[in-house]
Image (cartoon, helix red, strand yellow):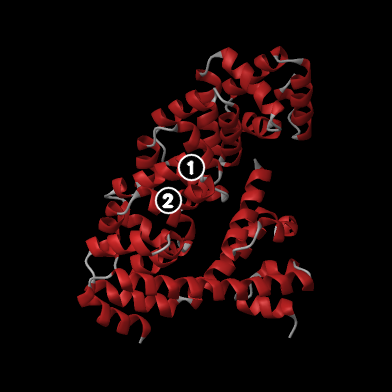
Amino acid sequence: MSDVITRTQLQLLARLLEVDVSEVSHLERLGVQGLKELRTAISNRLFDGEAEMFGRVSKLAPLVPDVVVVKVAQAAVPALVSGRLAGALGLAHPDRAVGLLKRLRPGYLADAAPYVDPRAVAVLAPMFEAAPEALLPAAKEMLRRKDYATAAGFLEFSTPALVEAFSLEIDDIDALIEAVAFVDDDGALSNVIRHVPEHRIREIIGTSIDNEAGVVAALSVGSRIDEDLTRRISDLLFLEVAEEKLLEMLETAVRNGAAAELVRIAARSGERSQQRMKELAPRVSKKTLAALRAEARAQCRPDLVP
Amino acid sequence: MSDKQALSDQLSGCAVVQQLTEDEAAELLAMVKAVRRSRLKAMFSSIEEALGHLPRVLRGPARKILLG
């Protein structure tokens, strides 16, 4: 999963610079945080350089009613330009942001979303707390397209109320957990998970455990969040999920290179969850057991996989 | 001034720039310059297109505000 996130950072940098990803792929060595810092600095530079033009467009707002803005934007303005403008316009006219988003087509919003200034997303997010329905259709469209990196960018800045609304209203749990796994900042990821209601976490575990991508994404999330959260979630996993599904999860984790994440979660789990892990481990295939043992030793917890 | 220093200045002293080679910094600097031009071009062409879709009565004042 960490490789996927690094590749995603390269793709986001390439998209920002309007070049093919092969032109920046040699920067992979900077790592997720380095690439993100570089992209953020370039993004800030570009948006700051366009502030004067954004200011002019913003002055038009009082002249043009919402219905005309929507019609003209969708007919004549490429979504990437609308996306770039959206942050500045939203900050200058916050009273119109919710109304406009409700009128724009979800497909157009999903097209524009990757191009919004992330700094504006953080400031504008609280305005949508009372009206998550203005964002939900576009969020669902982004997940339908598997544009998890963009969805994660918005999740990272979502308020607790918005996280709760998204987690409850988005039906596609497989896509939801994948998008959550793309949140690259561990602190932000913990903030997201902390505000998902427990019954929904139970449903997410129950669904994602049935598919490989879901297991890998969930293990990535579980191993990166704050320790108290890992413990809470691992108890829901190890103590409530059926034995045969847990055995399959151990196999899936190893098959997909996620043994380290699994052992990290087990190491942070409560006593009863660790006991369950110890009971289950000897029952997996020899190959899986060997991989889990090696990982447990590497993390100085050989007792977890006897 | 080296390309690395120029890029660092453009990016408000972003620390990651120090991990780049001179060649990498030069390439990135050129990419940033090119994308700035490309974004402005896209913005102006969208504005022209949007003006044509505005109700007639708004076009004059809007053009004046946008393009001076």
From the image, which quarter does the C terminus of chain A lie in?
top right
Q: Chain of mark 1?
A: A
**Where in the figure is residue A130, as x and y percent of width and height?**
27, 50
Q: Marks 1 and 2: CB-CB under 8 Å?
A: yes
Q: Nearer the viewer, residue B49 or A231?
A: B49
- Left or right: residue A138 versus residue A114 is left
Residue A95 in sight from this viewpoint? no
Q: Chain of mark 2?
A: A
Element under label 2?
helix
Q: Nearer the viewer, residue A129 or A255?
A: A255
From the image, which quarter does the N terminus of chain A lie in?
top right
**Where in the figure is residue A296, as x and y percent of width and height?**
74, 29
- Left or right: residue B46 versus residue B7 is left
Residue at screen point 47% across, 76% down: A50
The residue that disc 2 covers is A110
Which label is found at residue A145? 1
Q: Amino acid at mark 1?
A: Arg
Q: Amino acid at mark 2?
A: Ala
**Where in the figure is residue A291, as x and y percent of width and height?**
77, 26
